[in-house]
Structure formats: C-alpha cells, structure tokens
Amino acid sequence: MQPRYRICKGTRRIVIALPAWGIVIKAVRLRIQDIKDFLEELDAWGEMMWDNPDPEVRVLFWETVGLSFRRHLYGAVGGIADNWRERRFYKHADATARKLLKPTPFSLLGLFNVQHLGYPATDWAVCNAFRLIAKSELNRDGHHWDTPSNFDLSSGRPLLLDYGSKTTQTIIKKFGSRFLTYFQLEAGRVQK
C-alpha cells in the first residue's frame, strides 16, 4: 500500500508529496533561527560600535547590519523567492525548457507551489549523464546537478523537480536542447 503522503525538508522549502492526488506541494520553510541570529548579531555589533563617535565606524556598522539582514532574511524566507522563480520559469519557459521541467501550474505568491508528482531518481548515473553534456558548467550549481533526487526519470526522459535557483535556470536555458538531444542514462552509468 502506498503512503498517503510523504514529507521532505530542504534548506528553504518543505515538500509534501500527495501521491493519491498526483501532486506535490512545496511550502516555504520559515527558519526562525535565522531571525534570532540576526538579532543576536545586531545586539553584539551595537554594543561594540553604537557609542563610537567616529562617523566611519557608524557607516561600517550600518553596512554590516544591512549585509547581515539580507543574509539572514534570505535564509529565513528564501523559499518564497525559490517558489516564485520556479513558477515563473515554468510559466514563461520556451518549449525546449518546458520539456525538461516537471510542471508547476500554481503558486500562491511563492508561499507554496503545486507541482505535478514526480518520482525522484536514486541512480547517480543521472548526474553523470548531465555532466557528460554540460561538463564543468554544472559546477556553478553543484547542489542541484549532483543530487539524483532532483530528477524524475519515470517518463523516459529527465525531468527537473527543483528548478527555483537562478543558476539552475541559466543552465537549463543554455543547455536545454543539448540535454534533450544527448542525454543517455546508460552513458552516465559507464562514466564514474
């Protein structure tokens, strides 16, 4: 008997697979720890720099606060950006790119996406087969292209399950037609 649902946690998103409905819901994973870390850093830097009369130190303080805020804010709610980019990329992709993507027909402002159910690959050969085509270009986005579970091979061709990253999308645009033409899982098994 197939389970009713399956939950997987990523860095910025939680994926809930609902096989009976044939969908996957990708929800934002709010990371409260990133907000706490930002407030702790702000407190520590404030104690060191706030009373300093030197204007250069004040400028440095606010630049540091801004960088920390962006880093921790993205960590806390980066899943919203990933979800929104993934939906927009699918919606506006050309015909070639769409043949490589598991459809994402709906997003609620990036808070959650609905994607057609995919069956994550477990065979490392899928990563090797992509690497044979795009070579070192894939190093720019190693997390994605070196993880078999980011791909679905059940349709006989590779489909990307996770394509919310700008870098992943750039690689798809650049190599999409080559991936469709030259992808061979068996060649990936030979290449170690």
Image: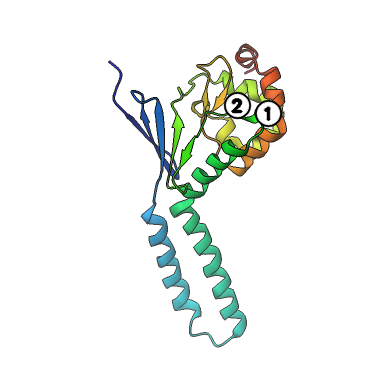
Task: Give the x, y percent position of residue 10.
Answer: 43, 39
Quick one: which residue is furthest to the bottom in this view?
Answer: 53
Q: Are marks 1 and 2 in contact (CB under 8 Å)?
A: yes
Position of residue 51 in the picture relative to residue 29 (left or right): right
Task: Give the x, y percent position of residue 156.
Answer: 56, 14
Q: Mark 1 or mark 2, which has the lower sequence index?
A: 2
**Neighbours of disc 1 within 10 Å: few (<14), some (14-19), many (20+):** many
Quadrant occupied by the N terminus: top left
Q: Picture quarter containing residue 44?
A: bottom left
Q: Which of 183 and 97 is in front in this view?
A: 97
Quadrant occupied by the C terminus: top right
Position of residue 34 in the picture relative to residue 6 (left or right): right
Q: Picture quarter containing residue 128?
A: top right
Task: Give the x, y percent position of residue 62.
Answer: 55, 74
Q: How far apart are marks 1 and 2 (CA)?
A: 7 Å
Relative to 64, is 84 above or below?
above
**Neighbours of disc 2 within 10 Å: few (<14), some (14-19), many (20+):** many
Disc number placed over residue 176 in the picture, else none: 1
Task: Give the x, y percent position of residue 7.
Answer: 35, 33
Secondary structure found at label 2: loop
Position of residue 139 in the picture relative to residue 19 (left or right): right
Secondary structure found at label 1: helix
Relative to 55, is 180 above or below?
above
Residue shown at 59% from the left, 86% from the top:
54
Q: Mark 2 points at which residue?
A: 100
Residue shown at 45% from the left, 45% from the top:
12
Image mark count = 2
Give amino acid for label 1.
Gly
Give amino acid for label 2.
Leu
